[in-house]
Image: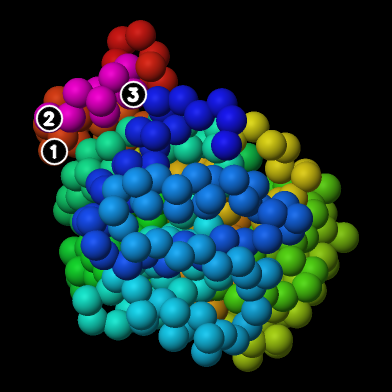
Amino acid sequence: MKNITENHIRGAKNLLINCADLKPGEKLLIVSEESDLGWYDGHCAEFIATEAKKMGIDQMLTKVGSPKNFRSTDLIELIEENTVTIFFSRIGDQERFSQPKAGTRIVMCYIRDMDMLSSPIGTTNYKAFRDFKKAVDNVLFNAEKIEISCPLGSNLSGALPKQQKKASDNDDVRRFPLGVHEPIEAKKFSGQVALDRYLAPTGSRVYEPDFLKLNETVIAEIELGRITAFTGPKDEVKKVKEHYNLVANKFNIDPTVVHSWHAGIHPGGNYKVPESDDPDRWSNTVFSQPEYIHFHTCGDYAPGEISCTNHGHTIKVNGLALWNKGILFPNIFEVTKKCINTWPELKALFNQTQPKNF
């Protein structure tokens, strides 16, 4: 493989060691989606396999096609035979909601190509963002009130249900990069969410059409985590209602549920492929960037089936803006500020992406 740089190797070690916790002699399965499907370049998975071999890891790479709405028994057997499975495949987005066999780990990788692997989103220490996620979770879980707004008209507020005052304990399923805080249940949130540009799948299950293009903004009215109405241009509202009903009827789920939301926490992302090229792939890639917030809707389970994305949001926690117009300000809260100061690479990354007075 040509043009390999130190940053490519650094990104590979970040995935294999810092994230997957792999050690020499352990068994690694790499699940690589066919590159002609347009989501992964294929080279990145092969490079990770090569680097794993150099580290003394017993690695195996298997090719797969597009995701289906059923689990492959052959793939399940392979996963259970290996210490770690790394998915360069959308199938991993489905598998991360399954409980791995005891003693095994799953990593869902959102690195699409070699350029992403060698960029800050691939090279910045995974363990730093693991700690930073915990710090952001701490802020959100202890909030008395959270207010969310965006320029297109989103405006909702609420707090966490009492039972969600802590993060998930499941460390056997990991994401690389680690780019979002713990999803916040929406059952205590009310207001409105602006639906703009595209509605996309969440990656949970497969359906067609997999996205809906919106020509104008539609407002979803929310009451305690339920969509009570859609308002806006008549033709656009009709399209939205039909799309929600199509997905809900296919899976026999409740279309009115707003299950949860999360915002990006990783400023190292810089995905440049236009959203219009593939709205599903775009949504599934940029969600870790702080300028985007995702709402999971249609289905009373994580993460629902329809995702809507807002850009340039402000999220106030107890009146203080942790995100302000799409920029994450970790110095606003003591626990996030302390984390940034503990990890020099985090501080450097935020310094590069923040206004000068950061």
Q: Amino acid at mark 1?
A: Val
Dividing the picture into quadrants, the one containing residue 69 is bottom right
Q: Residue at x 82, y 65 (%)?
A: 239
Q: Quadrant of residue 307?
A: bottom right
Q: Is residue 293 left or right of residue 246?
A: left
Nearer to the camera, 286 or 176: 176
Residue annotated with mark 1: 335
345 drawn magenta = yes
The quadrant of the picture occupied by the C terminus is top left
In this rendering, position of residue 134 left or right of residue 30:
left
Tell me what residue is drawn at x 16 percent, y 34 percent: 339
Residue density around tag 1, few if under 14, some if 14–19, many if 20 or more, within 10 Å: some
In the image, is 234 to the left or to the right of 231? right
Amino acid type, label 2:
Thr
Give the Cα separation between the discs numbered 3 and 1.
Answer: 18 Å
The answer to which of marks 3 and 1 sits earlier in the sequence is 1
Mark 2 neighbour class, 10 Å CA radius: few under 14, some 14 to 19, many 20 or more: some
Disc 1/disc 2 C-alpha distance (Å): 11 Å
Q: Which image quadrant for residue 290?
A: top left
First in residue order: circle 1 vs circle 2: 1
Q: Residue at x 45, y 53 (%)?
A: 49
Tell me the magenta residue range.
Answer: 342-351
User: Residue 34 at x, y = what percent?
Assistant: 68, 60
Q: Which residue is mark 2?
A: 342
The image shows residue 33, relative to residue 354, as above or below, that is below
Viewed as shown, does residue 303 lie left or right of 138? right
Amino acid on which disc 3 is placed: Leu
Q: Position of residue 85 (x, y in %)?
A: 40, 67
Residue 299 in the image: state x and y as whole percent: 54, 78
